[in-house]
């Protein structure tokens, strides 16, 4: 039997999904597939388009590759627009004059941006936001513009405004309706969103009807509004809605809706035999679905129908959760409360700028919809309740009212969900399927992703998927214990959040509120580190002191014989002759062993506890500061000599190393941190083996992250290039603080990254693209640490009470007789046990 | 060690010389002894870590493990029960313990 010829018009997100589903179907052999793409490349992630502005390349956005299509035997023609359909002969024709026969035709032509028909709209620098080529044009225009206007205050318009803002333009949003995101938000929610966005310096103009675009006086253009006002701008981005791309259907007698869109039935079939329409071009039950998940469902339904299956498209949920310009927004179901008789619960927090509204059925039993602005943690939970038509708890307001102790809002838990609940809307994975996968042995989120695909689309469901997995594991009797120790039923990350959110300042308060018992040598130093990262108090302050490991407590490194080593900071490895002399003199006076460390500084070994303040007094007087060699904190920023001296150097690596070391010294983190800065790509500072590596290039600094020497060396990953000094510091601020927030106890950045969900890509999206809207907060937190820096040793020697703590014995001035040194290569070293026996007891030697 | 009529009490320091959940070292009859404070209670054990022979136990972190009050050696982190001296990780290892009391704001050890 000859194969059926399937032709797909449009290789966007949905067209590709259709192909991918079909080639992976067990009946794939029965079909030959040909795809036409009007764009110059195969399908890419349009949903993630904005990432392009924060460094993602067109390649990063690709959803597939030519190699994949070739491997699967899919034929494709790029840059080739289909312009004709002869449904009687089952023939297609393209703009390049090609004619092709089909057995089944799939229209996946998506939509196009709607540009209102106003005078002057076709001038240069009047652009739209839909394809990679559009983004290239926007970037080019922004580089010669100062002010930018987005026409349209909907979901896409606000995303476009964010892009303009990131491109450095003074940004305005002009909206026809009286509020932002009129489709998804109610009036109060839209109002709050507006205030939040204006606080970010994006000016919002509502109820503005643009009349025409003429030459400007200050800027390139002037937009005149119907109410007589005007606005000057250098560029204009239209984002006033989308229109289904139904041109082909219109011309070739396929039924379309009154306001456009190719009419389809529950099988995604159009009015003409053998022709399907899926994605944003399709009109089902009078509705266009402008989101990707419903499109994916249609792709699945069309495949099913072609292979003889019975899947049906029965509508889709349009709930959304987004971060717009850093503001969290979510809308579920009947967000406007249009259902007759419905009642609302509203929670508003004017200080924290949070607005939440629940729309509940007249009998108070079912959730019909919700609007969340400013805080959307409840989204997953509410969406499940709404979609599964679950009964509401007795006091539905508890679902949106914050609870006092800073823990998560009261939800109904994943256990309350029916097995049929769809957890991942992108891939339509139900709770039951996830549970099945767990029972069959998938016990990590990675395994769940690869066997069910849940969480591999927009990623929005990963948290819920993880909860379902953990709950199932627990039911199977598998212990999912990520507690840091017996005293706290929490991970380090959770403790960090509890401390931050609850403004907890002491271990006592932490264990009283969130733990049990007295604590131990695991949770105490962990808490000390978290408290330091958050509040940066002096580590020997009374309640903090007992939490510290001996190294932190004595601010020196404990050695095998109970003595300590001392490592003063020598930022970037640069030291004056005078300071070198002081180190020599102090070492000589206290009889200390000296060694150059692997971190470009000098270590003085063999000090007894009571000698530490005496030695540090001399060092501090000579201008030295603590080097934190004892802390889980910044150690060294290794540098090469750089452009100042080296004939190959392109930038001042020593200067940058010192700047970085001065900035981050004292930052307490989950584990120690090491940096390197090299002056050119010869990389003499070995920056690519450091947590943070910086390498000078002709175009500026390159930043590498998450390298490691030590036990399991890891080459650092290139994170960003072409940075100036300020950009470099800004990215490092965010990177370090994000690690401090989320790293596990004693987890170096290398291991952290390898365990980070989504890996480098995710890290970039958070740090670089600010996907979580955290950047400003992370930078502010880091600035807080920088501003509160103090040299712990300086503070200690200035305080007689603190110095007392260093006494070797509380009841005598004697020194420790178990500490015994012998001479080797003209310096001291700890005596071996055998040597101690001999030295302490000459008789033993005589008898030997 | 139990308290008998013939017990002599040796004063080592003031109670406020020892911060809560901290330890100090005292030299008593040429013995290095580690004394800890847990709220209003004081505990005393040998200061020398039997695993390394370094006099470091007074510098360990104090806490509880499964209900026993312990100190963790700062060198290799074994735990010692402050009441019995027993090492939690190795049943064959323990350290000597001493009785401590408070008299007129002073910490005294029974020697
Ligand atoms: C002193 C020094 C060795 C030397 O004489 O050169 C040293 C000494 C110690 N290192 Fe190191 N490391 C020293 C440079 C390094 C380097 C080289 C570097 O930084 O460029 C590395 C590999 C680079 C890296 O960390 O990625 C290094 C990788 C380690 C590791 C393994 C870390 C890992 O992630 O695998 C440990 C163990 C740990 O931290 O858990 C460690 C732990 C230690 C400890 C803290 C072990 C201990 O608990 O006693 C040593 C105590 C230091 C002390 O008493 O002062 N040290 N250590 C170096 C101090 C540098 C400084 O100026 O602060
Ligand atoms: C900036 C942006 C952000 C978005 N964010 C989200 C989001 O957060 N969540 C969400 O769910 N959705 C989001 N969307 C919407 C989402 O991208 C669309 O729902 C999805 O891309 C629709 O897929 P599609 O395949 O139907 O259309 P498209 O992806 O537009 O693909 C259609 C393709 O067909 C081609 N084509 C058209 N006509 C022809 C022809 N005659 N011959 C050959 N080829 C043709 C087009 O060039 C195009 O490549 C966003 C969209 C944009 C632009
Ligand atoms: S890395 Fe480059 S600039 Fe630095 S010392 Fe080596 S060769 Fe010179
Ligand atoms: S909902 Fe998008 S990946 Fe699961």
Image (tube, coloured by chain):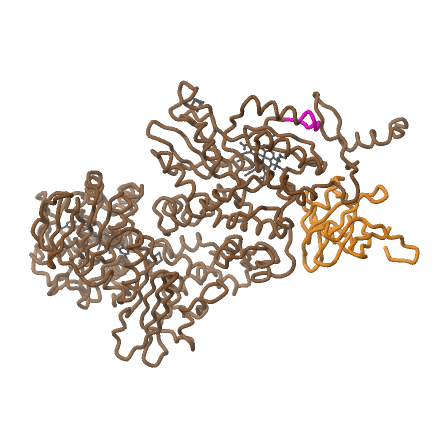
- The chain painted orange is B
Please say if A836 is above or below A35: above
Residue A93 visible somewhere in the drawing: no
Across and down, in percent, residue A358 comes to 34, 71
Tell me where the magenta segment starts and ends, as one range. Answer: A587-594
Is residue A592 shown in magenta?
yes
Across and down, in percent, residue A807 comes to 73, 41
Percent x, y of residue B22: 69, 50
How many marks do you count on the picture? Answer: 0
- Name the foreground residue: A616 vs A801: A801
The image quarter containing residue A299 is bottom left
At 68% from the left and 54% from the top, the residue drawn is: B20
Relative side of A171 to B29, left or right: left
Give x and y (percent) for residue A770.
Answer: 36, 48
Displayed quadrant of residue A847? top right
In this rendering, position of residue A538 left or right of residue A781: right
Residue A617 in view, yes or no: yes
Q: Which chain is brown?
A: A
Nearest the camera: B20 or A109?
B20
Q: Is residue A399 left or right of residue A359?
A: right
- In the picture as drawn, the residue positioned furthest to the right comes out as B6
Give me the residue at 18% from left, 43% from top. Answer: A78
Q: Quarter of the picture for ligand 4?
A: bottom left
Q: Quadrant of the C terminus of chain A?
A: top right
| Whether residue A407 is situated above or below residue A738 in the rendered picture | below
Q: Is residue A391 highlighted in magenta?
A: no
* Residue furthest bottom as drawn: A363
């Amino acid at each position: 039997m000859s194969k059926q010829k399937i032709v797909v018009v449009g290789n966007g997100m949905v067209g590709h999904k259709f192909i991918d589903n079909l080639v992976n179907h067990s009946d794939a052999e029965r079909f030959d597939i040909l795809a036409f793409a009007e764009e110059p490349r195969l399908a890419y992630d349009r949903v993630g388009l904005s990432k392009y502005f924060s460094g993602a390349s067109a390649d990063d956005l690709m959803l597939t590759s030519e190699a994949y299509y070739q491997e699967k035997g899919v034929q494709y023609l790029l840059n080739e627009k289909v312009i004709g359909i002869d449904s009687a002969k089952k023939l297609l024709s393209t703009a390049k004059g090609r004619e092709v026969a089909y057995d089944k035709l799939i229209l996946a032509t998506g939509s196009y941006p709607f540009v209102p028909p106003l005078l002057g709209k076709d001038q240069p620098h009047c652009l739209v936001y839909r394809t990679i080529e559009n983004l290239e044009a926007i970037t080019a225009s922004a580089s010669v513009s100062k002010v930018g206007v987005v026409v349209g205050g909907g979901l896409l318009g606000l995303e476009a405004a964010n892009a303009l803002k990131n491109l450095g333009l003074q940004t305005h949003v002009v909206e026809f309706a009286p509020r932002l995101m009129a489709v998804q938000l109610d009036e109060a929610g839209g109002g709050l969103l507006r205030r939040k966005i204006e606080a970010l310096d994006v000016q919002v103009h509502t109820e503005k009807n643009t009349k025409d675009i003429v030459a400007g006086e200050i800027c390139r253009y002037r937009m005149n509004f119907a109410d007589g006002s005007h606005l000057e701008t250098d560029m204009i981005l239209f984002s006033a809605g989308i229109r289904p791309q139904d041109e082909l259907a219109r011309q070739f007698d396929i039924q379309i809706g009154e306001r456009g869109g190719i009419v389809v039935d529950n099988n995604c079939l159009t009015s003409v035999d053998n022709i399907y329409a899926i994605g944003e071009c399709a009109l089902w039950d009078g509705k266009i679905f402008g989101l990707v998940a419903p499109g994916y469902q249609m792709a699945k339904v069309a495949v099913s129908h072609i292979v003889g299956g019975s899947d049906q498209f029965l509508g889709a949920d349009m709930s959304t959760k987004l971060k717009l310009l850093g503001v969290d927004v979510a809308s579920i179901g009947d967000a406007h409360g249009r259902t007759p008789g419905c009642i609302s619960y509203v929670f508003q927090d004017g200080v924290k700028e949070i607005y939440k509204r629940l729309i509940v059925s007249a009998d108070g039993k079912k959730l019909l919809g919700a609007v969340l602005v400013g805080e959307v943690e409840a989204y997953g939970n509410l969406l499940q309740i709404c979609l599964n038509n679950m009964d509401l708890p007795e006091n539905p307001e508890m679902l949106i009212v914050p609870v006092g102790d800073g823990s998560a809002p009261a939800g109904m838990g994943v256990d309350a969900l029916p097995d049929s609940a769809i957890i991942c809307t992108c891939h339509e994975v139900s709770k039951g399927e996830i549970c099945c996968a767990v029972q069959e042995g998938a016990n990590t989120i990675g395994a769940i992703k690869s066997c069910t695909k849940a969480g591999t689309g927009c990623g929005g469901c990963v948290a819920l998927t993880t909860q379902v997995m953990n709950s199932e594991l627990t039911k199977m009797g598998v212990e999912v214990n990520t507690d840091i120790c017996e005293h706290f039923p929490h991970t380090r990350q959770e403790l960090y959040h509890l401390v931050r959110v609850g403004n907890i300042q002491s271990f006592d308060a932490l264990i009283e509120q969130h733990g049990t018992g007295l604590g131990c040598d695991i949770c105490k130093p962990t808490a000390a580190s978290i408290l330091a990262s958050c509040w940066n108090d002096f580590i020997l302050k009374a309640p903090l002191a007992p939490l510290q490991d001996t190294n932190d407590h004595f601010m020196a490194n404990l050695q095998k014989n109970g003595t300590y080593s001392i490592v003063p900071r020598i930022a970037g490895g640069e030291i004056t002759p005078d300071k070198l002399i002081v180190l020599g003199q102090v070492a000589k006076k206290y009889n200390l062993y000296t060694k150059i460390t692997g971190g470009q500084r000098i270590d003085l070994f063999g000090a007894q506890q009571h000698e530490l303040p005496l030695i540090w007094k001399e060092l501090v007087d000579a201008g030295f500061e603590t080097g934190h060699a004892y802390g889980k904190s910044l150690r060294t920023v290794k540098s090469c000599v750089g452009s100042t001296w080296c004939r190959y150097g392109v930038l001042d690596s020593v200067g940058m190393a010192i700047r970085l070391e001065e900035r981050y010294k004292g930052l307490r983190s989950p584990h120690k941190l090491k940096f390197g800065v090299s002056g050119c790509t010869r990389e003499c500072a070995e920056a690519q083996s450091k947590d943070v590596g910086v390498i000078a290039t002709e175009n500026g600094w390159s930043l590498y992250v998450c390298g490691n020497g030590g036990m399991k060396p890891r080459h650092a990953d290139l994170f960003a290039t072409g940075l100036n000094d300020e950009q470099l510091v800004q990215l490092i601020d965010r990177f370090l603080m994000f690690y401090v927030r989320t790293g596990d106890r004693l987890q170096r950045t290398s291991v952290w990254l390898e365990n980070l969900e989504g890996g480098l890509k995710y890290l970039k999206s958070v740090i670089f693209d600010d996907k979580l809207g955290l950047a400003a907060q992370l930078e502010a937190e880091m600035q807080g640490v920088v501003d509160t820096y103090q040299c712990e040793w300086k503070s200690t020697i200035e305080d007689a009470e603190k110095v007392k703590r260093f006494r070797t014995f509380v009841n005598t001035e004697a020194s420790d007789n178990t500490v015994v040194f012998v001479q080797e290569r003209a310096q001291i070293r700890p005596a071996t046990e055998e040597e101690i026996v001999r030295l302490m007891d000459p008789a033993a030697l005589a008898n030997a | 060690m139990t308290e008998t009529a013939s017990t002599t009490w040796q004063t080592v320091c003031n109670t406020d010389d020892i911060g809560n959940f901290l330890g100090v070292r005292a030299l008593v009859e040429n013995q290095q002894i580690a004394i800890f404070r847990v709220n209003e209670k004081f505990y005393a054990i040998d200061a020398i870590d039997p695993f390394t022979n370094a006099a470091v136990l007074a510098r360990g972190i104090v806490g509880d493990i499964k209900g026993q009050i312990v100190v963790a050696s700062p060198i290799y982190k074994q735990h010692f029960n402050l009441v019995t001296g027993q090492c939690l990780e190795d049943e064959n290892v323990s350290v000597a313990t001493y009785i401590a009391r408070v008299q007129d704001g002073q910490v005294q050890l029974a020697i």
